[in-house]
Image (cartoon, rainbow, N blue to C red):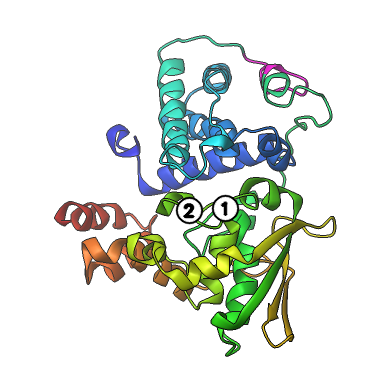
Amino acid sequence: MGEELGASEVEMLSAFVTGFETACRVGYGLGEAVTARGWHGTGVFGRLGAAAAAAALLKLDTEATLHALGAAATQTSGLTASFGTMAKPFHAGKAAMDGVLAGQLAAGGFHATVDLLEPAGGLERAVLQDGSVHIKPADFSGWEILNNSFKPYAACHLTHPAVDAGRQIGKSGFDPTGVRAVRAHVGELAKQITGGKSGAPESALEGKFDLKFCVALALHGHNLSAADFREPLRHDAGVFETARKVTVEAKPDLTFTSARLEVELDNGRIVTADIPVAKGHPGNPMTWNDMRDKFKGLVESRLGKRSNSLFEQLREFGNGKALAAIRAVSRAA
């Protein structure tokens, strides 16, 4: 959209930050509440962020921006029941598409209900319903974008603390074939969304939302890259056998960023790991090298040696020269 409008890199970044901050302010404190009620937060709040970003790029005035946000809010969708299928990432793409459309419609004079985002407004009544939590008045002091998490693993974010614990134990030199039982203690939301799976996923996408399977991968020394969820590994009998021994229990003292793992071995010894803050969280951030490795793991099969160049160009986005270089590398792919 920015390219189509002839926006500069700085204007694009500014619009992105505007959208990010808007989505965070509306969704502040509501992520777990909407997820517990079956909504995917990206589908709810991502649309609003995309609409705010579009409004910034289109330079809409206050009234038109309100209509853009209203048009985005009324398109709210995305169900957690779709997790583990292609529909889950589709939520993110559709949210972006609908937000852009909402901005374009508002630029053309489209009118929507403008108070849907108010506390006790239409959006809150629809997605939360019971009135136990509310959209808070927006406070734009500080920068939420500085508190963003990055995902080191190609799995649902709620699995990451337990995966960190599994990898920590997996690196300790123990033999995963000598495991008698694995007890994963996690937060309530992690148990609800990822803990009730079978441990024997039938697809790579399903495996990414199966905490038992993810913990087993970690205990067997895998990095949980995208490649670790592809067909060959899904038929690794050892991983499946370990996953079968994992039980998941929610603990009130744990959050979506923390987990405890207890691995009981055949000889009776118990190995434990306690993760207070998962890797990638602002309290335990990934390094630039970590992010480069994650990026290369996703694009190197397509771009080869150009992966490093693209990463560096993306890192420098905003200097006025990066966009052309990014286009050149991407088109060459």
Helix, strand or loop at label 1? It is loop
Left or right position of 12 against 163: left
Mark identifier at residue 309: none
Three-letter amino acid code at the position of disc 1? Ser
Q: Amino acid at mark 2?
A: Pro
Which residue is painted at 48% across and 73% down in the image? 238
Q: Relative to 140, is 69 on the left or the right?
A: left
Placement of 2 over or under 175, stated as above or below: above
Q: Is residue 261 above or below residue 188?
A: below
On screen, 130 above or below 203? Answer: above
The quadrant in which the N terminus is found is: top left
| Mark 1 residue crowding within 10 angstroms, few (<14) / some (14–19) / many (20+) | some
Q: Which residues are magenta?
A: 114-122
Q: Quadrant of residue 79?
A: top right
Query: Which residue was labeled with disc 2?
Result: 201
Quadrant containing the C terminus in the rendered view: bottom left
Dot 2: element: loop
Residue 146 visible in the shown view: no
User: Which residue is disc 1 drawn over?
Assistant: 198
- Residue 18 shows in the view: yes
Q: Would you say residue 119 sits in the magenta stretch?
A: yes
Q: Nearer the viewer, residue 200 or 288?
A: 200
Q: Are marks 2 and 1 in contact (CB under 8 Å)?
A: yes
Which residue occupies 47% across, 40% down?
88
Q: Which residue appears at 55% of the width and 11% of the height?
A: 112
- Give the prevailing secondary structure in the magenta stretch: loop
Magenta span has 223?
Answer: no
Q: Residue furthest left?
A: 332
